Image (cartoon, grey):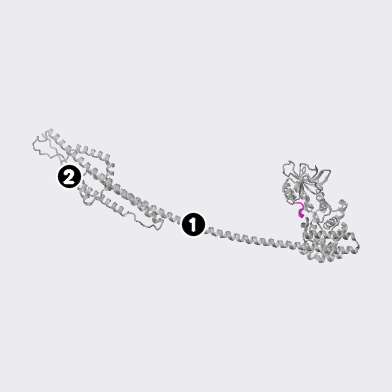
Amino acid sequence: MSKEIKTRQVHKDVKALDKTVTGMERVKRAYVRTKETVENAQPQETRHASPTEYAEDKTERGADRAVHEAAHQARKQGSRLVEKAKEKHRTSKETKETKAAKAANEGTRGGSSPAHGEPSNSPPPSAPSGRGEPYQPKEQMRKKAQEQAAKQAAQKKAAGQRAMQRASQQRISQQKAEQQAAQFRELPKQTIKTIDRGEKTVRTAGRTGQTVKNTGKGTIKSAAKSVKTAEQTAEKTVKTTREAAKTAKAAARASVKTAEKTVQMARQAARAAEQAAKAAAKATASAVKAIIAGTKALVSAIAAGGWVAVLILIIVLLFGGLLCMVGGGNSSTVSPVSAEVEAYEPVIRIYARQYGIEEYVELIKAVMMQESGGQGSDPMQSSESGYNTRYPREPNGITDPEYSIECGVQALKDCLQSAGVENPVDMEHIKLALQGYNFGNGYIAWAQSNYGGYTAANAAEFSDMMAERMGWGNYGDKQYVPHVLRYYIFGRIPTGTRSGAIVQVALTQEGNGGDAYWSWYGFDSRVEWCACFVSWCAEQCGYLESGVIPKFSLCSDGVDWFHARGQFQDASYVPAAGDIIFFDWENDGTIDHVGIVESVTDGVVNTIEGNSGDICARRSYSMGSDSIYGYGVPAY
């Protein structure tokens, strides 16, 4: 009993064929669009008006080249895909025909088919459904599908690349595309899908080109932003330059103002110099007046027959006038009196003549200058003297300047007589009289009986004694004598005593500690105070104010001061009383100590020093000792 083999006619869906045609149409349109894009993207020669246009043009050209290259690769891959599809179609057809023949032979051997040479009523072996071949068994269909899937999976990547390359090399016309579509109508669905993937590859290439274009546009925008940033930077630079210019102008204006101030200062300095010249002229005039006064005194002396006194007076007057007019080592310490004091000279002369001391007019003016500078209603400060009988005997009790001068002249005359002053240049007795004018006449008798006359040391001693006795903080002016003599034209004439005053002051301090000296100098706590002691002694004698000795707390500063004035001598020098001695204990050039020379006897230098064993003490050294650094020699 023969078994009938059922077959069924399978027809390909029309939609599948339509999809094939649609795919080819899309490939065609993609190619045409790519071609137009490439042709439209050809660079044009243009002149670039700005860096922004140049950047845009360059970026657009790069994008066009990228799109063209992508389209070219897509065409090449498409062509390869087409060739591969044709090859696969031929192979598949041959395989099917072989299998169909084999199946027919197997059916004949099973007794189901007609004998050899006899006609058969069964259909021929199956062929592609598009041509109406009979249906094949399921197992054969599965096996065939698996083989096709394996082959397609192995050749998928290579087929896509060849299709892209082929699409790039050929420009397919509309007629060729239709013929190829007719040939591909019988391709399997998976082949059509591969073609669709080729189309997608072309689309991807187009998108890549678009991305490149977008990137180019982004680059152009970035370039535009860079240009704007550069413009902003340029604007900021211009602004900075303008600000710098403004600053330079301001600096120039400041320089002009500074120059104007300098000119003003120069003018002020010139005015000060002019005033100094006027002051010098006044001093010269004062010297001339003193000479005139001396001449008047000379006439009076001649009338009295005192020829010896006349001769001394002539010499002194000439010497004093010469010092004031041509200068000298001490002339710079003589200061002129104020204009207010000069204005009182006629009144001073009237009362000086009335009370017999007309030759001391210059000394009276110096006293007034120290007492008040010629100001106030009591210019001679004589309210507390015994000659004031009209006004209260208290400071500034007198309110009539002329009466103050009258009382002051009488008080000074008494002091001159008590001190034994013989003439206007008898400085030793004048000093005693002047200090008596300040302290009161009682000082003169006390100094004469205790010390034989005035010294700076006993003046300080008397002041301290009276302050303690009266219960006051201070009594009078310990430095009254040097304060007055700085205005007296004969106050700097050498008297033969040289510098004994500072020695006497120093000796009165023997045995004292140093707190009084370093605190006087201005220190809040203890320091090495030997230099402070020397400065304090000089201040008591008026030597600091007159510039004879410096105020110093460092020994090296004292050496530098004397060196600068050419008044320093090395250790080989033979010192005199009042010289300032400096020591170098280690002989290393460092100044370690300072003191005051008291005397020199038999090759031994005797000194009085502060901070020697932390007290004021007297010491002695051999002449030329290695410890002696040198001497400062004041111009007393």
The image quarter containing residue 344 is bottom right
Residue 501, image x and y in percent? 82, 51
> In the rendered view of the protein, which quadrant contains the N terminus?
top left
Q: Which label belongs to residue 599?
A: none
Query: Please, what secondary structure does the residue beneath circle 1 have?
Result: helix
Residue 27 position within the rendered picture, expressed as x and y whole percent measured from the top left: 26, 49
Query: Mark 1 or 2 closer to N-term?
Result: 2
Q: Nearer the viewer, residue 600 or 318?
A: 318
Q: Secondary structure at mark 2?
A: helix
Q: Is residue 516 visible?
A: no
Q: Which residue is disc 2 drawn over?
A: 130
Q: Residue at x 72, y 42 (%)?
A: 588
Boundaries of the magenta span: 545-549
Horizontal side of residue 264 vs 439, given as left or right: left
Q: CA distance from mark 1 to mark 2?
A: 79 Å
Q: Is residue 362 above or below residue 517?
A: below
Please, what is the three-letter code of the amino acid marked with disc 2? Gly
Q: Is residue 14 above or below residue 404?
A: above
Q: Nearer the viewer, residue 328 or 353?
A: 328
Task: Please tell me how crowded label 1 is: few (under 14), some (14-19), or many (20+) other residues with Cα within 10 Å.
Answer: few
Residue 633 placement (x, y as % from top left) = 78, 49
Q: Is residue 145 left or right of residue 316?
A: left
Residue 568 sits above or below residue 108 on the image:
below
Residue pointed to by mark 1: 236
Image coordinates for residue 524, horizontal then vertical, percent: 72, 48
Residue nearer the viewer, 439 or 54: 54
By secondary structure, the bulk of the magenta-drawn segment is best described as loop
Q: Nearer the viewer, mark 1 or mark 2?
A: 1
